[in-house]
């Protein structure tokens, strides 16, 4: 299983970014995939989940209404569209899944998102 995030950048408050998670090594359309984030000095927090069929998305309260998670089961990619970004959204963002066949969690290396004027 491989997960690689991209799209992180430095943007001003109120701006937008789209993160992408490229994946390989597992049956993509059969696995739910999550986004997490970790701010400096803080624990890693769950942000959003897209179910395997892309029919359901769940969000942390802190991002609800601003972030949208989606997936492309043909390209094997997961996206996190982030709008109205705030300084408190500054963090390293990680793609994550639990793969039932390996019996463990899998993480990407992360991508840095910085929101500052």
Image (spheres, helix red, strand yellow):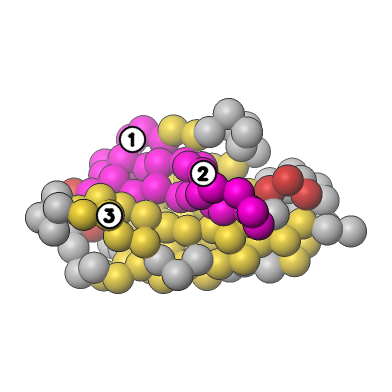
Per the model, the C-alpha gap separating discs 2 and 1 is 23 Å
Q: Residue furthest top?
A: 61
The residue mark sitting in front, 3 or 1, is 3
Residue at coordinates 27% horizontally, 54% vertically from top-left?
105
At a point 69% along the width and 54% down the height, the residue shown is 90
Mark earlier in primary sequence (2, 1) = 2
The stretch of residues the image draws in magenta is: 31-57
Q: Which mark is residue 31?
A: none
Q: Count the labels in the image.
A: 3
- What residue sits right under mark 1 in the picture? 55
Secondary element under disc 3, as helix, strand or loop, is: strand
The image position of residue 111, as x and y in percent, is 55, 67
Label 3 close to label 1 by CB (< 8 Å): no
Whether residue 75 is visible, yes or no, is no
> Which is more toward the observer, 3 or 72?
3
* Horizontal side of residue 112 vs 20, given as left or right: right
Q: Secondary structure at mark 2?
A: strand
Q: Position of residue 83 (x, y in %)?
A: 68, 46
Q: Is residue 34 magenta?
A: yes
Residue 56 part of the magenta segment: yes
- Which callout, 3 or 1, points at the residue further toward the start of the chain? 1
Q: Residue at x 24, y 68 (%)?
A: 1
Q: Is residue 111 visible?
A: yes
Identified at 51% across, 44% down, the residue is 45
Residue linked to disc 3 = 105
Task: Tell me the mark number nearer the camera, choosing from 2 and 1.
Answer: 2
Which residue position is annotated with label 2? Answer: 45
Q: Is residue 94 above or below residue 60?
A: below
């Amino acid at each position: 299983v491989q997960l690689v995030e991209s799209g992180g950048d430095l943007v001003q408050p109120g701006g937008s970014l789209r993160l992408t998670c490229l994946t390989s090594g597992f049956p993509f359309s059969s696995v739910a995939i999550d986004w997490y984030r970790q701010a400096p000095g803080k624990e890693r927090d769950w942000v959003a989940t897209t179910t395997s069929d892309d029919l359901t998305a769940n969000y942390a309260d802190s991002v609800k209404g601003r972030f949208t998670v989606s997936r492309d089961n043909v390209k094997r990619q997961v996206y996190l569209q982030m709008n109205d970004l705030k300084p408190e959204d500054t963090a390293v963002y990680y793609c994550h899944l639990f793969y039932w066949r390996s019996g463990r969690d899998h993480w990407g290396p992360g991508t840095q998102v910085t929101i500052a004027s």
